[in-house]
Amino acid sequence: MHYYLITGASRGLGRALTEAALARPDTTVIGICRHATIEHERYRHQPLDLSDLAAVQHNLHKVFAAFPDASSLTLINNAAVLGEIGYLGEQPNEHYEFVFDVNLLAPAMLMNTFLSAYQGRELPRTILNISSGAALRPIDGWGAYSASKAALDALSRTAQHEQQLRGSGIRIRSLSPGVLDTAMQEHIRSADARDFSEADKFVGLHQQGQLRKPEKVAEQIMRWLNGPDLGPEVVLRVDELL
């Protein structure tokens, strides 16, 4: 059985990835999110609020079970929040704590526990972190989101380097999926131009039908993950997939 542990599986890209995984035979998905929105005989829901780090820590043993029948294990850190759009100096400090908890600290804890729990297993093991193009350039109003994704990219590079030095065979990648038609995009389009100078650009992308469907991107990601070679780059974009 191929096991996929996917955060944020209830909607958006996370749900699309879950459905794409379940479309394949001999696959079980453990959805790590607050609400269960998928009903399938091979779907298991693990309720967890990733903004509550104490709850994450206390429930890690439930997420990373032994799975004795596993033929492969894959963790996909997909869940993320943009937070309120606004400039540094005009946001409450709690905003940064919330965004970094969900986008960086919870994924780091999940990565750390995955690597520890499955270090000695003789089977394919993969960690995929869903990043963003915002990690690579300054976008006004998105400071916490951009910084958290950049840090996730750096953590992915370091973790992959460490696993190569250990010779574990574990593969770690950080992937930017592009601009998708999700609830986060709806939030972005509602922003005031005073807090986000690119607001009109994102409205235009939606009006011109240039937002990619999560289902199509999820299928592309799943084909890549199930291929024989993920390529040498640790941090990459969806349009660079083999």
Image (spheres, rainbow, N blue to C red):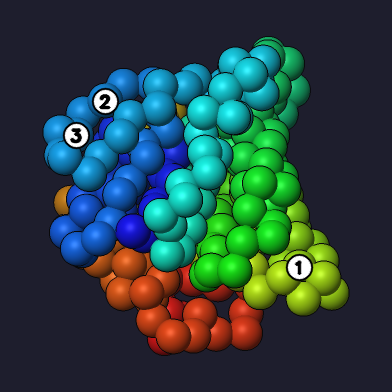
> Where is residue 233 drawn, in percent x and y?
62, 79
Q: Quadrant of residue 46?
A: top left
Inspect the image, locate mark 2, and give the three-letter code of the amino acid beneath it. Ala
Which of the two residues, 207 or 45, is positioned nearer the viewer here? Answer: 45
- Residue 106 is tagged as none
- In the image, 137: left or right of 126? right
* Observer able to see residue 240: yes
Question: Disc 3 versus disc 1: distance between alpha carbons?
Answer: 34 Å
- In the image, 179: left or right of 38? right
Element type at marker 1? helix
Q: Residue at x 51, y 80 (%)?
A: 230
Question: Disc 3 versus disc 2: distance between alpha carbons?
Answer: 6 Å
Residue at the disc numbered 1 = 163
> Where is residue 133 drawn, in percent x and y?
53, 59
Residue at the disc numbered 2 = 36
Inspect the image, locate mark 3, and give the three-letter code of the amino acid beneath it. Ile
Element type at marker 3? loop
Q: Quadrant of residue 8?
A: top left
Inspect the image, locate mark 1, and give the three-letter code of the amino acid beneath it. Gln
Q: Residue at x 43, y 57 (%)?
A: 70
Q: Residue at x 17, y 59 (%)?
A: 23
Pointers 3 and 2 in contact (C-beta within 8 Å): yes
* Observer able to see residue 213: no
